[in-house]
Amino acid sequence: MDLINRYIYAVGKRIPRKQRKDIEKELISSIYDTLEDTYGKKNEYSDDEVESVLRQFGNPLDVATGYQKNNAYLIGPELITPYFMVVKIVSGAVALGLLVSFIVGLLTPELTVTKFVFEFVALIPSLLMGIITAIGFITVIFYLIERNVPGYQLKGVIEKIKWSPKDLPKVPSEKEKISLFESIFGIVVTIIGIILFNFFAEKLGIYYADGIGEKFQFVQIFSLDAIQTYLPFWNIVWVISLVFQIFCLIQREWNIKTRAFELLTKLLSIGILIMMIRGPELIDFKLLLEKSSSEIIEVFTPVVEFFKYSLDGLLIIALVGTCIGILVHAIKILISLSKMSFT
Amino acid sequence: MSDYEKYLESATLELRRGTLVLSVLSVLEKPMYGYSLVQTLAKRGLLIDQSTLYPLLRRLEKQEFLTSDWEVEDNRPRKYYKVSNLGEKFIKDLQYEWEKNISIVEKLTSKGEK
């Protein structure tokens, strides 16, 4: 019976392999029971008869869904609202980031209106690709939270019926709240950073016109060698801090989890800062001054002298700042831990 | 379908869904296979889609309220379901809950006696 086989196949392919054989066997048996009951015992049933019985059984998709376990979902109800929020924010940030880098990328002496329009149209596919990739990453992150962070699984929610009002988390005070704007700003800046340094590092620099109507001049700021050395490490920290910022958007308050996460990202940045102090200079000031025109040198010289031809001073300040930040976070974690042990 | 009809339909379905487990388990006085169970239920007034019943039977089996055996009759394998000991207890407890529900809802809905 070709129709029955096709029907069983359509149901079976949507059912987990482990139960498939048994369910298929039972369905076949029930289909024949129904046929026999409706049209009498026969060796062969007509296509019309089979069709009417199969219609009665229903759409194979619905039948297969009926056999699915309840957790046949990617992101549960607990997380779906923050998920959509993060998708919107990150898609916006990626679009903005790509636009900014697109404009930076276009700033060349040969820029004409036609070229601008042409490049702009060419940008659309990569804009879409970027957004789709970002949504993919977010989905993976949420999936991992869903399956691995206790309290988010649907099952966990149901099993936690034994709750007590005393266990409810405190309403965060204004100080403990993570501002929405801060998180969104952080996400946007991080994404723009990732895009700029990964794809347009050679375009980062100072653009200036020698005079009205003159062509643009360009001085590259960063040493590409240094960027190449540091970029893999930056990327690791950026991605981790993106995940952190998304996690903050879900939690919306400073608690042990968010603080511990922040601590981790800060520790990583310390490692990288130390590496940058010891490693090659990010900005080669001597080279910068050599390449620049006289007007630029005039503007630059005080700045360069302030830094003493090296960014190390700035990096050390950042290092100290980060260390203080870590200390503050560690103390706050200790405070909330001690509060927890009292209650 | 108007919104009202849609809401009525989904509320009715929900009412029914809650009673399905008790109905199905109660009818299984002797071992039955899927289609015979559909018919028995229909005879007693409960029309249930086969695509609803079979997954339900499987779930009850997984929850250990039912056990099953394949038997061959008329050259055709049939899966017979039987209520387990745990299932018997489950029926009793569920029946008790059901009756409690009825008496509460009846008190609430009969406007005369309060």
Image: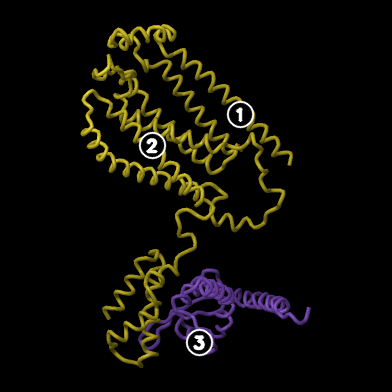
Chain colours: A yellow, B purple
Residue at image point 42% right, 46% down: A140
Q: Quadrant of the C terminus of chain A?
A: top right
Percent across and percent down for residue A81 are 51, 51
Q: Given the image, what chain letter belongs to the residue carrying mark 1?
A: A
The residue carrying mark 3 is B42
Tell me the amino acid under the disc marked 3: Ala
Quick one: label 1 or label 2, which is nearer the N terminus? 2
Q: Given the image, what chain letter belongs to the residue carrying mark 2?
A: A
Percent across and percent down for residue A91 are 40, 43
The residue carrying mark 2 is A96
Mark 2 surroundings within 10 Å by alpha-carbon count, few (fewer than 14), some (14 through 19), many (20 or more): some
Element at badge 2? Answer: helix
Q: Given the image, what chain letter belongs to the residue carrying mark 3?
A: B
Answer above or below: position of A62 versus B113. above
The residue carrying mark 1 is A330
Is A98 left or right of A247, judged from the image as shown?
A: left
Distance CA(mark 2)–CA(mark 3) = 61 Å
Q: Nearer the viewer, residue A320 or A17?
A: A320
Tell me the amino acid under the disc marked 1: Ala
Is A124 left or right of A245, judged from the image as shown?
A: left
Q: Nearer the viewer, mark 1 or mark 2?
A: 2
Residue at image point 62% right, 74% down: B90
